[in-house]
Amino acid sequence: MTTETILDWISKQPPIHISNHEQEVCILYQELIDRKSMVFCNGVPYIWTGTYFQCVVDQDISMILTNLICEVDRVELNPYTPKTVYRKLCVDSRLQVDIEGEAEKNRMYINIPNGIYDIATQQLIPHDVERKFNYDSISNTSWVQLSSKHLHSETLLRVAWGLKS
């Protein structure tokens, strides 16, 4: 993930206000737990982008956590707070997920930018943080409802098998 992409993601998050800097570790930690926008799989951090979980490298975590805090409160932020909070988040059982194992559960779904295509029902459903798609599973296409079920099935097969029209 590039720095620009991370900062773009951060700009879409509500800023975290630190009302008491003596408690900043607890405040930041609890806020991140409540948001559920960061999870860990085998110690690797992922952030929820709104459509999928994106892997983040450890080196970017301090920047992410620092920039989630509103600008005014960053002035008094202890420089060790982001790393302390990160270490606590890494081992919190509420944030541990098996993103790779979710692939089997999600094998009847295709994650696309405008939703999740349910192969069984042939319907588009909204993105959901509970479905642990990661970046590798998102398709670079969008869903358009077709009027003919036959045409729809044929088109889906062509896309799935890479056949040309």
Image (cartoon, grey):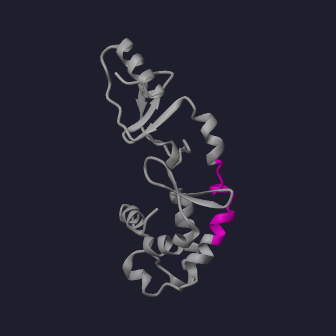
Which residue does the image show at 43% across and 50% down from the upper left?
50
94 in the magenta segment: yes
Compare residues 32 and 101 and report the one nearer the observer: 101
**Image height check: is 56 above or below 148?**
below
Compare residues 63 and 12 and report the one nearer the observer: 63
Provide residue 10's location: percent of width, then percent of height. 40, 65
Q: Is residue 84 left or right of residue 31?
A: right
**Image height check: is 13 above or below 124?**
below
The boundaries of the magenta stretch are 87-98
Question: Which quarter of the rendered picture does the C terminus lie within?
Answer: top left
Residue lying farthest to the front in this orientation: 164
Across the whole image, how many numbered discs are drawn on residues? 0
133 in the magenta segment: no
Q: Is residue 92 left or right of residue 4?
A: right
Provide residue 18's location: percent of width, then percent of height. 47, 77
Which residue does the image show at 45% across and 21% down from the upper left?
157
Provide residue 46's location: percent of width, then percent of height. 55, 57
Compare residues 80 and 155 and report the one nearer the observer: 155
Which residue does the image show at 36% across and 65% down from the upper left?
11
**Image height check: is 127 above or below 54?**
above
Q: What predominant SS class does the magenta segment belong to?
A: helix
